[in-house]
Image (cartoon, grey):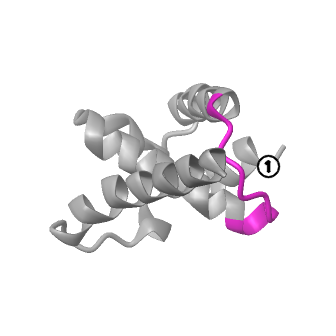
Amino acid sequence: MKRRILKVLLALLIVLWVIVPLANAEKVDMSQLTCSDLLKIEDEDEAANLIVWLDGYLSGLTGDPKIDENALEQFVEELIKFAQKNPDVKLLKAAEMVGTE
């Protein structure tokens, strides 16, 4: 029971951490972002928000709703490598290629 409550609280914290800053942000058409845009992000919170959003996007595509810290870390590393080699590729396409292999 305690484990389930902790999972719910963790999920709520993640949602609040991502959603609250976005509520005050400008609207972004995620389908138009490129790998180059990802590489230009300097703010750690902005980068973390984007990565969590991409993970959710991929979860919707694959039907896998689990958050795996190790897999997420590996995804970020692979996505950055891919982005450096392919700066003009749309970010969603790159995330799909790297994250659904």
User: Regarding mark 1 in the picture, which secondary structure is present there?
Assistant: loop
* Between 48 and 84, the one nearer to me in the picture: 48
Whether residue 19 is visible to the viewer of this picture, yes or no, is: yes
Residue 26 to residue 5: above or below:
below
Residue at left offset 68%, top offset 37%: 68
Neighbour tally class for label 1: few under 14, some 14-19, many 20 plus, Cα within 10 Å = few
Residue 80: say if magenta. no
Magenta stretch, main secondary structure class: loop
Residue at left offset 32%, top offset 69%: 28
The residue to which callout 1 is attached is 100
* Between 40 and 18, the one nearer to me in the picture: 18
Residue 62: say if magenta. yes
Residue at the left extreme, as displayed: 24
Residue 70 to residue 99: above or below:
above
> Where does the image place residue 17, in percent across and percent down from the top left?
32, 52
The stretch in magenta equals: 60-69
Q: Quadrant of residue 81?
A: top right
> Where does the image place residue 58, in percent across and percent down from the top left?
67, 58
Residue at the right extreme, as displayed: 101
